[in-house]
């Protein structure tokens, strides 16, 4: 059994264990439902039995039943949250199995980051379905997706890459904790996260300015004393005190309505966010309490350090908003506000929290997103222990052993060794159709992008200096832009020349240039372009069917090398080994492919 199969078996075992725990929790939740029904039934029964005795007997019993009912609701809610959490873990673990077997992923595939004008992302399948981003992404938040996408779109500095590698390796040791971390975030509504971040990015203190009104303190402190006192006196003495109690409730209600608009303004922004905040707080608690060893994570965690941990601060805010959300239940809201001025109390608590913690509250959200991106890379590390972390070199270097494409399954993937010599400027790769030229270019490019992001690469050894990659592969016409294929090719070649002329660290990957014109112009244009790259000392690999390009090695013996992918043909059947070899290609297969569809070239 391979290492990867062992990981899948381990995932499957965890899934079965969690399913058993989930089933047991469902039974407990159902039992609590029956208990709640029993308490409610008893409340009705006791009300009926003691109705003749009077109000004094019914009220204590009713209050006791309400307390018992709410206690059961609270416990059941905890069990339900745990049940949902276990089921979310099951979904994520099943996704890991599917990801390893079929490269599928329920997380965002990054299609929104696709950009045809980017130097390489479209050509190398970095974003979109069946892409590198889709393979590695484990970010549920919009910010996490942006961070991971940024790492894949632009090379980092050598020091940053090495620090990120160390952080990813440390996080790879905590797969169970990472699963909990991701399970807390995956189902959170993205619009809620963005809403609360947006609220705190603006000046939230402006929304609570109305609390400076001295009338508010009078309402908050006088209301419970007055109304509870009158209620007790009314129960004991009756008579006119019930009328006074009713009048007090009316006056309290008027006071509540007076500030309702200001409270609504805050609540609209923060309503139903308590679960979201609680999950963020739990994730930050793990981050804050763990003793991290790597430099990058230590630097990341530093901004959330304070007298109170960030998790404590957010837990505090979550409780305040949970209390404020009681106003969503009309009956509960009426009782709480008439006796306690509940909404005003909650908003005042929020204002105090904002004053004490608001300055660096958003740093906690940013940290969670940064961890998501690192966990994405650490999951790749865990899934493929046979892959390696690249060595980042200062001087020109591109050297690999057993290099393969990450999106080709292990049983189908053919690996190659390759070394780009610093003395050579251009490597020309010739070969027949479907022999593997384009795949090899993408294999090299994709692994370089992973290396520059701080991730593992699909190789047993990989050494590279930092290059700014530019590709020329999928060139398409555009009706919208009124651009023909040839014009699009010319524009791409110009972009490559402009980009590389001012960047000594450029590396160009070109697959069959100038295919939108006649064979003579194609050859002449390709030849001049390669000469231009050699002249400005821009490194590159050029895949082509044109053997005349391979002959440029005679003109530039020190600056150009030839490699090829070939085929074996037996009885008009083709066999590919997908291994790169020295020299130019001698075997081609177009006539065989044409003959297969009924077009015999006679060759």
Image (cartoon, rainbow, N blue to C red):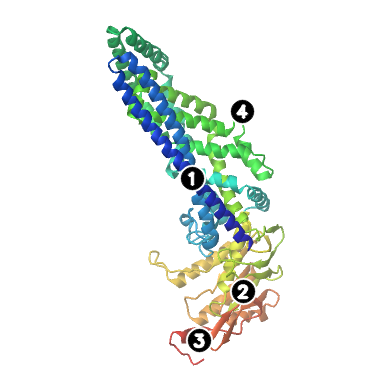
Helix, strand or loop under label 1: helix
Residue 591 is tagged as 3
Closer to the camera, 59 or 333?
Answer: 59
Foreground residue among 513 and 302: 302
Residue at 47 percent across and 87 percent down: it is 595
Judging by the rendered image, the residue that carries numbered circle 1 is: 22
x then y, percent, for residue 215: 39, 15
- Name the N-terminal-most of marks 1 and 2: 1
Which callout, 2 or 4, points at the residue further toward the start of the chain? 4
Q: In which quarter of the image is residue 439?
A: bottom right
- Point out residue 140 in the picture as x, y percentages from the top left corner: 50, 48
Which element carries disc 3, helix, strand or loop? helix
Residue 505 x, y percent position in the rendering:
64, 61
Element carrying mark 4: loop
Closer to the chain start, of discs 4 and 3, is 4
Image point (29%, 22%), residue name: 48
Q: Is residue 507 left or right of residue 476?
A: right
For label 3, count other residues whose C-alpha is less than 10 Å away and answer few (under 14), some (14-19) or many (20+).
some
Please indicate whether residue 295 sits to the left or right of residue 499 in the image. right
Query: Given this view, does label 2 or label 3 mark the residue nearer the observer?
Result: 3
Q: Which tag is nearer the camera, tag 1 or tag 2?
A: 1
* Image quarter of residue 232: top left
Q: Residue 476 carries which label?
A: none
Label 2 to label 3: alpha-carbon separation: 31 Å
Q: Residue 307 carries which label?
A: 4
Q: Give me the C-alpha separation between circle 1 and circle 3.
A: 60 Å
Q: Can residue 537 be seen in this view?
A: no
Q: Which numbered circle lies on residue 531?
A: 2
| Residue 298 percent coordinates (x, y) | 66, 41
């Amino acid at each position: 059994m391979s290492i990867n199969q062992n990981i899948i078996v381990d995932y499957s075992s965890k899934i079965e264990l969690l399913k058993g725990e989930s089933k047991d929790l469902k039974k407990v939740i159902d039992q609590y439902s029956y208990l709640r029904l029993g308490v409610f039934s008893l409340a009705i029964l006791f009300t009926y039995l003691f109705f003749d005795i009077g109000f004094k007997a019914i009220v204590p019993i009713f209050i006791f039943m309400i307390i018992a009912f709410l206690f059961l609701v609270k416990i059941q809610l905890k069990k339900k949250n745990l049940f949902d959490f276990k089921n979310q873990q099951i979904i994520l673990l099943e996704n890991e199995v599917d990801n390893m077997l079929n490269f599928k992923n329920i997380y965002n595939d990054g299609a929104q980051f696709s950009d045809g004008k980017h130097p390489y992302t479209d050509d190398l399948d970095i974003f979109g379905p069946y892409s590198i981003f889709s393979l590695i992404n484990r970010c549920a938040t919009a910010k996490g997706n942006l961070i991971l996408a940024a790492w894949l779109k632009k090379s980092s500095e050598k020091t940053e890459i090495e620090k990120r590698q160390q952080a990813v390796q440390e996080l790879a040791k905590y797969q169970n904790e990472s699963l909990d971390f991701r399970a807390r975030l995956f189902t959170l509504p993205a619009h809620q996260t963005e809403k609360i971040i947006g609220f705190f990015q603006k000046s939230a203190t402006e929304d609570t300015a109305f609390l400076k009104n001295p009338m508010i303190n009078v309402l908050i402190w006088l209301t419970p004393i007055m109304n509870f006192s009158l209620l007790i006196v009314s129960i004991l003495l009756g008579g006119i005190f019930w009328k006074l109690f009713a009048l007090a409730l009316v006056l309290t209600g008027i006071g509540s309505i007076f500030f309702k608009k200001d409270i609504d303004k805050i609540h609209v922004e923060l309503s139903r966010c308590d679960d979201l905040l609680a999950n963020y707080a739990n994730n930050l608690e793990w981050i804050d309490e763990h003793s991290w060893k790597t430099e990058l994570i230590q630097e990341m965690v530093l901004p959330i350090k304070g007298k109170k941990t960030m998790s404590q601060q957010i837990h505090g805010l979550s409780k305040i908003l949970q209390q404020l959300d009681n106003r969503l239940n009309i009956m509960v809201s009426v009782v709480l506000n008439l006796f306690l001025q509940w909404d005003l109390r909650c908003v005042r608590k929020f204002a105090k929290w904002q004053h004490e913690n608001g300055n660096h509250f958003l740093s906690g959200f940013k940290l969670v997103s940064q961890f998501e991106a690192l966990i994405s890379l650490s999951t790749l590390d865990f899934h493929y222990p046979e892959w390696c972390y690249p060595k980042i070199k200062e001087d020109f270097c591109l050297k690999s052993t057993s290099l393969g494409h990450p999106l080709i399954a292990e049983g189908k993937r053919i690996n190659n060794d390759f070394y780009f010599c610093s003395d050579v400027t251009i490597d020309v790769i010739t070969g027949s159709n479907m022999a593997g030229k384009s795949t090899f270019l993408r294999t090299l490019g994709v692994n370089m992008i992973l290396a520059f992001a701080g991730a593992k690469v699909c190789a047993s050894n990989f050494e590279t200096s930092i290059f700014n990659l530019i590709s020329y592969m999928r060139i398409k016409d555009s009706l919208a832009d009124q651009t023909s294929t040839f014009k699009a090719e010319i524009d791409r070649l110009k972009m490559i020349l402009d980009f590389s002329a001012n960047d000594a660290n450029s590396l160009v990957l070109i697959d069959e240039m100038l295919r939108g014109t006649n064979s003579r112009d194609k050859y002449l244009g390709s030849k001049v372009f390669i000469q231009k790259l050699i002249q400005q000392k821009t490194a590159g690999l050029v895949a082509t069917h044109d053997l005349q390009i391979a002959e440029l090695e005679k003109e530039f013996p020190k600056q150009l090398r030839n490699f090829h992918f070939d085929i074996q043909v037996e009885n008009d059947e083709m066999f590919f080994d997908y291994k790169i070899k020295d020299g130019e290609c001698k075997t081609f297969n177009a006539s065989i492919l044409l003959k297969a569809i009924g077009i015999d070239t006679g060759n």
